[in-house]
Image (spheres, rainbow, N blue to C red):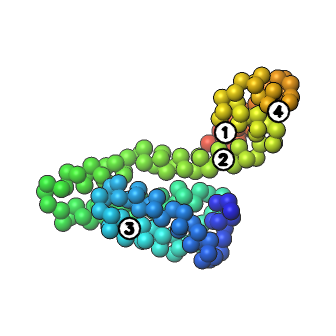
Amino acid sequence: MGFRKLTADIRRGDADAFELFYRMEFNNIVHFIYSYTYDMRNAEDLAQEVFGILWEKRNTLDPDRNLRSFVYRIARNRTLNALKEKKLFAERSVMKEIDEDILALEDASMEEMIDSLALEDIIEKIYLSLPDSARTSFELSRKEGLTNKEIAEVQGLSVKAIEYHIKISLRIFRKRLKEYLGYPAE
């Protein structure tokens, strides 16, 4: 099941789809929160809250948006709030560490990391949308590191055909990534 369908199902209130996503991501969210709170019980409690918020806001989900990045944003915000609350009651020796964790979560690079989840999803969608022959050639070239000649031998095609497949794949990637990033169409 793709994330788009999963998101649409959760939006409709499908408890099974929500449970599937919960099982896929709960431990990831716990570890993300734990890396800032250093308290496993607190991280698990916050992760439960994150998924509770997701369920409450399910009507606002957009299947064209990355569900994972949405959940990580919720986790980031809940963790920030928890750290700020903890700071109110913390001993002076602990306050510096909490301040550092708050700064790390508020840093623009955290937003970039969360946004990269969406970009990974876009890249995977583009990759899967490539024509089969072009996708195979592209994968052998970029993932396996084979030369065009080696790919031609594996696929039983000419080197020119492989060059064409890779050229088409790169053109599709370039066009769709530009669209995603908001650059004007050529």
Query: Which-is-in-front pick, marks 2 and 1?
Result: 2
Of residue 159 and residue 58, the one placed in the foreground of this image is 159
- In the displayed structure, 138 sits above or below 32; it is above
Alpha carbon distance from label 2 to label 3: 30 Å
Alpha carbon distance from label 2 to label 1: 15 Å
Badge 1 density bin: few <14, some 14–19, many ≥20, Cα 10 Å:
some
Asked if residue 99 lies left or right of residue 75, the reply is left
Q: Mark 4 highlights which residue?
A: 155
Write the residue at 86% across / 25% down. Answer: 158
- Quadrant location of the C terminus in the rendered image: top right
User: Disc 1 on helix, strand or loop?
Assistant: helix
- Expressed as whole percent of the image width and height from the top left, the position of residue 21 reads 57, 66
Q: Mark 1 highlights which residue?
A: 178
User: Disc 3 on helix, strand or loop?
Assistant: helix
Q: Mark 3 highlights which residue?
A: 44
Query: Which-is-in-front pick, marks 4 and 1?
Result: 4
Write the residue at 66% across / 29% down. Answer: 145
Numbered tag placed on residue 124 in the rendering: 2
Q: Residue furthest left?
A: 92
Q: How many marks?
A: 4
Evaluate if marks 2 and 1 touch, with contact meaning CB atoms under 8 Å apart.
no
Write the residue at 36% across / 52% down. Answer: 105
